[in-house]
Amino acid sequence: MRYHIPMYFRRVKNLYNPALHNSGEPFKLSRSKIENFTRCPRCFYLDRRLGIDQPSMPAFTLNSAVDALLKKEFDIHRSAGTVHPLMKHYGIDAVPFAHPMMNEWRENFVGIQFFHRPSNFILTGAVDDIWKDKDGNLMVVDYKATSVNGDIDWNSEWKQAYRRQLEIYQWLLRNLGHKVSNTGYFVYANGRKDKEAFDGKLEFKVEIFPYQGNGDWIEPVIMEIRQCLNGSLPPINEKCEFCIYRKSAAEVENKTEWSKEVIIKKRSKKSAAKEPEPIHLI
Ligand code: SF4
C-alpha cells in the first residue's frame, strides 16, 4: 500500500507575487480576504503570499438554504417591481433592485468587481441583495440566519464583521458609479427553539435591522494590505488561541523526529512486506 501524504499543504494558485502584481497584472482580492486581514495580517500573509490556507470548516448548509430561499422570495418582488411585505412592515420605501448584473453580483467567486488602481487590486464581493429607494439610491442588504434566544446581540465580534461586510459592498457599488445610500439592511432569520417539537420543520422569526455604513476605513486598509503583501511575514498575534496552539505544538514536535520534512521513501516490493517505513513530518 502506498501512502500519499503531501509534502506541504501549500496552494500554488492565487498567490501574490510582488514582481508580477506590483504594477503589472492586477491581484484579485475578495471581501472575505480583506476581513481575514483585519483579523490577522499574519494568517492573511500565510494564505495569500505563501499559499498556506487555514483548515477548512464544514459548510453552513442550513444558513445557505435560508439565503437561497430568501433570495427566491425577494426575486419574485424584483421581477414584479413590488415591495416585499416585510419591507412594508418595516416602513422601507423601496423595491428589490432589478439590474442585468444582479445574478453575477450575487455569485460567489464573481460578485461585484472593482479595479482599484492605487493598489493594483481587483476587489470583489458577492452581495445577497440590493434594494432601490424612490430617489434611486441603492441600499445594500445582507441576509443572516441564526438561532438565538431573545434579541440579537449587535455587539459581538461577528456583528462587527457583518458591518464591515456591508460597508465593503456599499464601497464597491459606489466605485462602480452607483448612487448608494449609507443605510443598509440586515434581514435576520432567527430559528425558533420555543416550539413544542421539531415536526420536520424549523420556524423563523424574520426581522430587518437598518445599519448606517461608513466605509472610510476601507481605502487605508487596502493600502495596508498591499504593504503587507510586499513585506515580510507579520508577527504572531499572541492572543490568538490557534497560534498559541501551533507554537506549543511546534515546540514539542521540534524535539522529536516528527519535526523533519515529510519524506515518503519508495519502498521496494520486498521491503513493503516488512514494517512500514517511517514517515518523517515537518
Ligand atoms: S495569530 Fe496565528 S493562527 Fe491566529 S490568526 Fe494569526 S497567524 Fe493565524
Image: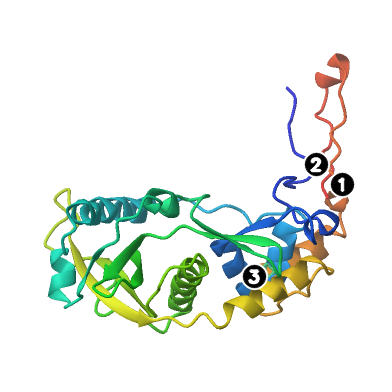
- Would you say the residues marked 2 and 1 are in contact, meaning their CB atoms lie under 8 Å apart? yes
Pick the residue in front: 31 or 192.
31
Residue 220 visible at all: yes
Mark 1 and mark 3: span between their CA atoms?
29 Å
Residue 153, picture quadrant: bottom left
Q: Could you tell me which residue is drawn at 74 percent across and 61 percent down? A: 46
Q: Is mark 2 within 8 Å of ligand 1?
A: no
Element on which disc 1 rests: loop
**Sequence-wise, which precedes: disc 2 or disc 1?**
2
Q: Could you tell me which residue is drawn at 75 percent across and 63 percent down? A: 249
Mark 3 and mark 2: span between their CA atoms?
27 Å
Mark 2, mark 1: which one is toward the viewer?
Answer: 2
Residue 58 percent across, percent down from the top left: 48, 51
In the image, residue 224 above or below residue 192: below
Element on which disc 3 rests: helix
Q: Looking at the picture, which amino acid does disc 2 mark? A: Met
Q: Looking at the picture, which amino acid does disc 3 mark? A: Phe
Pick the residue in front: 165 or 100.
100
Quadrant observed for ligand 1 in the rendered image: bottom right
Numbered badge on residue 261:
1
Residue 17 percent across, percent down from the top left: 80, 55
In the image, residue 177 above or below residue 78: below
Q: Looking at the picture, which amino acid does disc 1 mark? A: Glu
Residue 267, picture quadrant: top right
Residue 132 percent across, percent down from the top left: 29, 68
**Sequence-wise, which precedes: disc 3 or disc 2?**
2
Element on which disc 2 rests: loop
Q: Which residue is mark 2?
A: 7
Q: Which residue is mark 3?
A: 37
Residue 32 percent across, percent down from the top left: 55, 63
